[in-house]
Structure formats: structure tokens, C-alpha cells
Image (cartoon, rainbow, N blue to C red):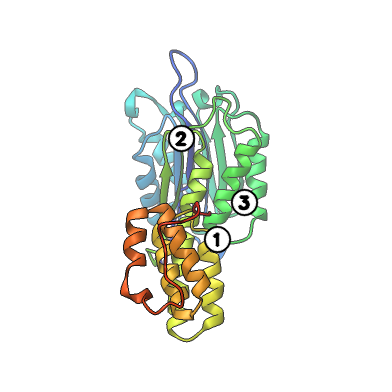
Amino acid sequence: MPMRWWLVPLALAGLLAATAPAGATFSIIACDQDRCGVAVVTQFETNPAMGPKGLALMAAGHAPADALAILLREDGDFDDEGVEARQVALVDAQGRTAVFTGRDAMASAYAGDRRGPGYAVQGNGLAGPAVLTAMEDAYKATRGGLEDRLLAALEAGQAAGGQSIGKLSAALVVRTPSGFPLDLDYRVDASSQPLPDLRALVERHHAWQAVILADRAARKGDTTGARKALAEATQLAHGWDRVWRRAARVALALGDTIAVHDYLARMAAANPVWGRQEAADPAYRDLASPVDAASAPNPAK
């Protein structure tokens, strides 16, 4: 089985001033139980070398606990911080986990972890233990792709109180043997609403994949499949002009004149210049009624 790994951190706040706890983060790393690989997350006072080094150690056959011991032993006091300022978690291909939270990280508002087969949830500077419990429960209860379960866990943690010092950024990374388009790598920095922004990025990704499926189905004469995929794409588009443009082309191929006008109008609302250019394309010349992209409604989600 090809190696598969995920690294899914959520960093909600940066450093604090003076002698206050250095930072606050909560995260979840996980892998599909039937196709598990390896995953590493490092946070609080991060040593970035621990990520790739931990992956390499587990790929070489080290169990997570052994790999973690090596990482801590060879930390090297990166950024003049030692292992007591680290919080590190690992998951391997057998679903085994290992987590370390140093004394400095434990001294933050609340720090801890929860683990199960194939996943580890950890955090520091949190509002309380309910944050980690909510993340674990949401991850296990949510259906859908791995990215959906991970994002649900982050949202549940935030809803349970999140970090005691507020929120600032969020990130989601998924790695697969197949690569793009299954791989995801999204992050939001310096945002007042990092998780909604992150969800919008992930949903736009799904929207683009859905409109591609709709196009392929339409070309094969699968009208039902095309309409189903098109409905998913337009629901998740978040005003992305590129999705609306391709949706209009698919609707045109399906003979859905009303949908063509709707999608072009939404495209023009998101990007007036490109919307007018698209509406003037000869592809739409034979429509029963003229396409007027100048008067467009506000773009829907």
C-alpha cells in the first residue's frame, strides 16, 4: 500500500507578550483506518524539523513512541526553546499514536490531548478540556471525506470555547498517493473568522471537482448525473466565477436555458469584466432569449 499521511494543524493565535504563555494551538491529525499512513503535528513553540523527520522515522519502521523519543532527544533547542516548549503528536500506518506536551506548554491556560485508533487531538492555551472532547466526538461522528471530518473537528473545538486568547489562523492539509485533486493544502492567516474562511476554501475545492464531474457526465449523455453534480457545484461555489462559468457551459449542453442565464448572471456579479466577455461568447448565440450579464444579482454561496 502506498504511503499516505495527513498533517492538519489549526493555529488560532500567535505569540503573547512578555512572560505570558508563548502561544496557543489546537489540532487534529488522522488517517483513514483502511488506508492509513503516517502523520505528525508540532505546535506551541514549534520545531519545524520535527514534521518531516517524524514522517521519515515512521516510514523507516519506528513506532510513534520510538519516533517521538528520537525527536525529543534530537530537538537541538530550535529557536532557543527546548522540548518543554513543544507539543508533538504522531500517528502511524497501524493507527498507533504518541503525544508529548512539555511543561511550558502544559503551563498554558489548558493543555492536553485525546487519542484513538488512527487519530490524535491535542491543544494548548485552550478554554478547557471540553475543546478536545468536542473535537474528538465530532471527528468520530462526522461522515464524508477525511477533510470533512477534520474540519468538523476543528469547528467543534472552536464552538466549545477554542483558545483562551482568541483566534487568528487555520490550516488544513491532506496528502494521498493519488495527489491532486484529492490532495488539499489550504490555510487562512490573520483572519477574524479563520474557520469559516477555511471551510469556504474547502467547499470551493469540492465545487470545482463537482462541476468537472458534471461536465464529464453531460458529455457522456448522463443527464441525471450531470444535473446532480451541477447542483452540488453551484451549492458550494461561494461566488467563484470560474465555477459559475463552467456551470453555465454545462447547463448550455443540457439545454437548461434558465440555468444558463442564472449562472452567467452570478458569474457577472462575481466578476463583471469576465462575465460580460463570457456572455458575449458565440456559444450562447442560439439561446432562445439574449444573455444580459450586465444586470446580475448578488452571487449566491
- Give the x, y percent position of residue 230: 51, 70
Q: What element carries label 3?
A: helix
Say what secondary structure mark 1 lies in.
helix
58 left or right of 96 in image: left
Residue where numbered disc 3 is placed: 139
Q: Which of marks 1 and 2 is nearer the N terminus?
A: 2
Residue located at (48% from left, 48% from top): 64
Residue 213: % across, % down = 46, 73
Determine whether 45 is above or below 155 in the image.
above
Q: Earlier in the sequence, mark 2 or mark 3?
A: 3
Residue at mark 2 to residue at mark 3: CA–CA distance: 24 Å
Query: Real-space Cα distance between discs 3 and 1?
Result: 24 Å
Q: Can residue 182 be seen in this view?
A: no
Residue 255 locus on image (x, y percent)? 48, 80
The disc at residue 191 is: 2
Sequence-wise first label, 3 or 1:
3
Mark 2 vs mark 3: give the one in front. 2
Please say whether residue 136 is visible from this viewpoint. Answer: yes
Towards the viewer: 2 or 275? 275
Q: Indicate the secondary structure of the residue bearing disc 2.
A: loop
Q: How many marks?
A: 3
Judging by the rendered image, the residue that carries numbered circle 1 is 235
> What amino acid type is highlighted by mark number 2?
Ser
Q: What distance separates the C-alpha of mark 1 from that of mark 2?
A: 24 Å
> As rendered, which of 223 and 152 lies closer to the eye?
223
Mark in front: 3 vs 1? 1
* Few, some or many residues within 10 Å of mark 2 (<14, 14–19, 20+): some
**For the residue carrying disc 1, how many other residues have a C-alpha within 10 Å: few (<14), some (14-19), or many (20+)?**
some
Q: Position of residue 38 (x, y in %)?
A: 45, 54
Quarter of the image that includes the N terminus? bottom left
In the rendered structure, which amino acid carries the disc numbered 3?
Answer: Tyr
